[in-house]
Image (cartoon, rainbow, N blue to C red):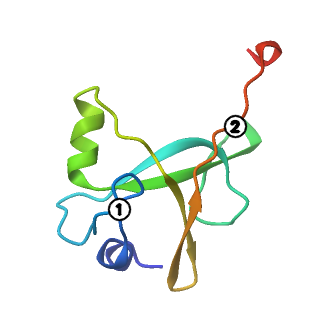
Protein backbone atom coordinates (compact mmCIF):
# COMPACT_ATOMS: atom_id res chain seq x y z
CA UNK A 1 0.00 0.00 0.00
CA UNK A 2 1.22 3.50 -0.80
CA UNK A 3 2.38 5.27 2.39
CA UNK A 4 0.58 8.49 1.43
CA UNK A 5 -2.64 6.46 1.30
CA UNK A 6 -1.87 4.93 4.71
CA UNK A 7 -1.43 8.40 6.17
CA UNK A 8 -4.63 9.60 4.47
CA UNK A 9 -6.88 6.84 5.84
CA UNK A 10 -5.02 5.92 9.02
CA UNK A 11 -5.46 6.87 12.63
CA UNK A 12 -2.93 7.11 15.44
CA UNK A 13 -2.37 3.83 17.29
CA UNK A 14 -2.20 5.79 20.56
CA UNK A 15 -4.92 8.45 20.54
CA UNK A 16 -7.07 7.42 17.56
CA UNK A 17 -6.82 10.79 15.80
CA UNK A 18 -6.61 10.80 11.97
CA UNK A 19 -3.07 11.13 10.62
CA UNK A 20 -3.90 12.74 7.26
CA UNK A 21 -3.03 16.27 8.44
CA UNK A 22 0.28 15.26 10.05
CA UNK A 23 3.50 16.63 8.63
CA UNK A 24 5.43 13.41 9.25
CA UNK A 25 4.80 9.70 8.75
CA UNK A 26 5.65 8.24 12.16
CA UNK A 27 6.03 4.54 12.88
CA UNK A 28 7.54 2.95 15.97
CA UNK A 29 8.71 -0.58 16.66
CA UNK A 30 6.72 -2.52 19.23
CA UNK A 31 7.67 -5.29 21.63
CA UNK A 32 5.08 -7.56 19.98
CA UNK A 33 5.33 -10.34 17.43
CA UNK A 34 3.72 -9.53 14.08
CA UNK A 35 1.78 -12.50 12.71
CA UNK A 36 1.25 -10.63 9.43
CA UNK A 37 3.47 -9.83 6.48
CA UNK A 38 3.62 -6.03 6.39
CA UNK A 39 4.66 -3.84 8.04
CA UNK A 40 6.99 -5.43 10.51
CA UNK A 41 10.56 -4.83 11.54
CA UNK A 42 13.16 -7.53 11.59
CA UNK A 43 16.82 -8.00 12.30
CA UNK A 44 19.41 -8.86 9.66
CA UNK A 45 21.29 -10.95 12.24
CA UNK A 46 18.26 -12.81 13.59
CA UNK A 47 15.59 -13.67 11.03
CA UNK A 48 13.22 -14.90 13.75
CA UNK A 49 12.59 -11.30 14.87
CA UNK A 50 9.32 -9.97 13.42
CA UNK A 51 8.30 -6.96 15.47
CA UNK A 52 4.97 -5.25 14.94
CA UNK A 53 4.83 -1.49 14.43
CA UNK A 54 2.46 1.30 15.37
CA UNK A 55 1.64 4.44 13.41
CA UNK A 56 1.47 7.55 15.58
CA UNK A 57 0.36 11.10 14.93
CA UNK A 58 2.67 14.10 15.20
CA UNK A 59 1.38 15.20 18.65
CA UNK A 60 1.91 11.69 20.08
CA UNK A 61 5.33 11.59 18.43
CA UNK A 62 6.15 14.88 20.15
CA UNK A 63 5.18 13.30 23.47
CA UNK A 64 7.63 10.44 22.85
CA UNK A 65 10.38 12.97 22.13
CA UNK A 66 9.51 14.87 25.33
CA UNK A 67 9.89 11.65 27.35
CA UNK A 68 6.15 11.60 28.12
CA UNK A 69 5.07 8.68 25.93
CA UNK A 70 1.37 8.06 25.36
CA UNK A 71 -0.12 4.60 25.81
CA UNK A 72 0.09 2.49 22.65
CA UNK A 73 -3.22 0.75 22.02
CA UNK A 74 -2.74 -0.87 18.61
CA UNK A 75 -0.28 -2.38 16.16
CA UNK A 76 -0.99 -1.81 12.48
CA UNK A 77 -1.15 -4.20 9.54
CA UNK A 78 -1.41 -3.25 5.86
CA UNK A 79 -3.70 -5.81 4.23
CA UNK A 80 -4.23 -5.02 0.57
CA UNK A 81 -5.83 -1.58 0.54
CA UNK A 82 -7.04 -1.83 4.13
CA UNK A 83 -5.49 -1.04 7.48
CA UNK A 84 -6.04 -3.58 10.24
CA UNK A 85 -5.53 -2.51 13.84
CA UNK A 86 -4.50 -5.25 16.27
CA UNK A 87 -4.62 -4.84 20.04
CA UNK A 88 -1.12 -4.14 21.30
CA UNK A 89 -0.11 -7.03 23.55
CA UNK A 90 3.55 -6.74 24.59
CA UNK A 91 5.62 -9.91 24.77
CA UNK A 92 5.86 -11.52 28.18
CA UNK A 93 9.38 -11.24 29.55
CA UNK A 94 10.07 -13.62 32.40
CA UNK A 95 12.88 -13.21 34.91
CA UNK A 96 14.87 -15.95 33.14
CA UNK A 97 14.64 -14.22 29.73
CA UNK A 98 16.80 -11.25 30.64
Name the residue at the right extreme. 96
Residue 35: x and y in percent read 73, 59
Tell whether 89 sits left or right of 55. right
Q: Which residue is mark 2?
A: 91
Quadrant showing the C terminus: top right
Q: In the figure, 97 relative to 53: above or below?
A: above
Chain-order first, disc 2 or disc 1? 1
Tell whether 71 sits left or right of 95. left
Q: In the figure, 54 relative to 39: above or below?
A: above
Residue that appears at 42% across and 57% down: 13
Residue that appears at 27% across and 44% down: 61
Indicate the quadrant where residue 15 lies.
bottom left
Residue 22: x and y in percent read 19, 62
**Circle 2 Cα neighbour tier, 10 Å, few/some/many (<14 / 14–19 / ≥20):** few
Please tell me whether mark 2 or mark 1 is closer to you in this view: 1
Indicate the quadrant where residue 85 lies.
bottom right
Residue 3: x and y in percent read 38, 72
Q: Which residue is mark 1?
A: 16
Camera-side residue of 65 and 11: 11
Amino acid sequence: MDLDRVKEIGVCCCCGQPTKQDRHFNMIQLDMDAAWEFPRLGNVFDSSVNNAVAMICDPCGDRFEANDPPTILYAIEFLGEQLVYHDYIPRAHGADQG
